[in-house]
Image: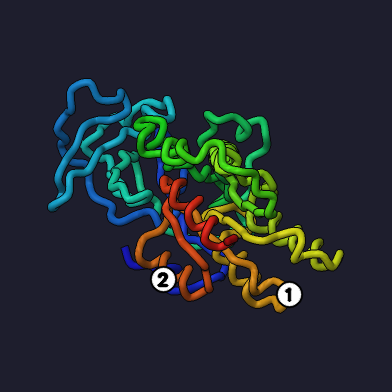
Amino acid sequence: MDTNILLESGTNELELLIFDVAGNYYGINVAKVTEIINSEPVTMIPNSHPCVEGVFIPRDNIITAINLAKVLKLPDSPDMTKDMFIITNFNKLNVSFRVHKIYGITRFSWSDIIVPDKTVASSDAALATGIVRWNNQLVVILDFEKIVSDISPETGLKVSDIEYLAGRSRNDEPIMIAEDSALLMRLITDSLEKAGYTNVQKNVNGREAWEKLNEYKEEGNIKDKVHCIITDIEMPQMDGHRLLKLIREDNQLKDIPVIIFSSLLNEDMRRKGESLGANAQLSKPEIGNLVTELDKILR
C-alpha cells in the first residue's frame, strides 16, 4: 500500500485503516498493512487455534487467516463472502485478519490518540492500545501483535533467548524505555534485569519520556540520568520517531544513544529510523539482540 506518511520522518503522525467488525469501529496502523483483498476460501489446518480459519496463498506466500470477530468474541457477519481480509506484515510475519467492512484510511496525529484508562488497558489481556474520534465515532486501535502472540506465543518476545545471560554481574548504567504495552514493558524490563541491567526508567509513551528528559536537562544532570534510550515506534501521544527527532535536534540530548525496538521494522520504517539517527533498530521478538546492542553501546 502506498501512503504519504511512510515518506515522512518524525511528524508524530500515523495513518489508520478504519474498519468494522460486528458494527464496531476499529483501526490498524497502515504501516502494518500490505494489502486489502476480498474474502476468499481458506484451507483449514487440523488442530489449529479456534480463531485461525486456515491458510491461503494469494500470490507466492502462505498467509494465515485470523477471524477477528472470534478474537474479539463478536458475532460473524451475516454473509462472510462480503467480508474483507487485511493482510499485514509485522514482526517478520505475514498474517491476514477477516473484517466485515473497510471504511478507508485517515491521517491522525499521535497526540489525538487517547490512552485507554486502567479499567480497560491495565491487564495483560487488554487488546486496546488507543482510542481516537472519527466521524463522531470512537475507533479502537487494536494491539495486533498481542492478538498474534496470544494465538501463537512463539511469535512474541523470545525471552528464552537471554536465559544464558542469567547471573551476569549487575550493571547500574541508567536506561530509559518508552513502551506503551504494559505486558511488553514488563517482559523487556524483566529480560534486561536478567541480563544485569537493573537501572531502568519506564515511560508509557514518547511524550512521557520527552518530558522526563527535559526535567533532567533543567536539573543539569542529564548525563548521569540517561545513558541509553530504548523506544517503541507506535505509541499514543508521541511516537518513537518523533521522540528520536526531538532528541537529535537538542544540543544537550543529541549524543544519547537511541535503540528502536519495534514490530514495525519494514524497509520504509528502517529508512526513517536511519534518517533520524537511530543507533540500532531491532524487531520486537529479538530481545537477545537487544541485549547485545545494549552491551555494545554501553561498553
Give the Cα distance between marks 2 and 1: 25 Å
In terms of image quadrants, where is residue 160? top left
The image shows residue 291 at horizontal and vertical percentages of: 50, 50
144 with respect to 2 (left or right): right
Q: Quadrant of residue 213?
A: bottom right
Q: Is residue 45 above or below residue 109?
A: above
Picture coordinates of residue 284 (x, y %)? 44, 48
In the depicted view, which residue is nearer to us: 106 or 34?
A: 34
- How many numbered discs, if any? 2
Q: Which residue is mark 1?
A: 252
For label 1, the SS is: loop
- Whether residue 87 is visible, yes or no, is yes
Mark 2 or 1: the one toward you: 1
**Residue at the image point whose x is 36% and y is 30% from the top:** 151
Closer-to-camera residue (37/51): 51
Residue, x 27% and y 40% (percent of image)? 83
The quadrant of the picture occupied by the N terminus is bottom left
Amino acid type at circle 2 is Arg
What residue sits right under mark 2 in the picture? 271
Q: Is residue 160 left or right of residue 192?
A: left
Q: Amino acid at mark 1?
A: Gln
User: Could you say whether the residue bearing mark 2 is in a helix, strand or loop?
Assistant: helix
The x and y percentages for residue 65 are 26, 37
215 vs 66: above or below:
below
- Residue at (81%, 61%) from the top-left corner? 215
Q: Nearer the viewer, residue 97 or 277?
A: 277
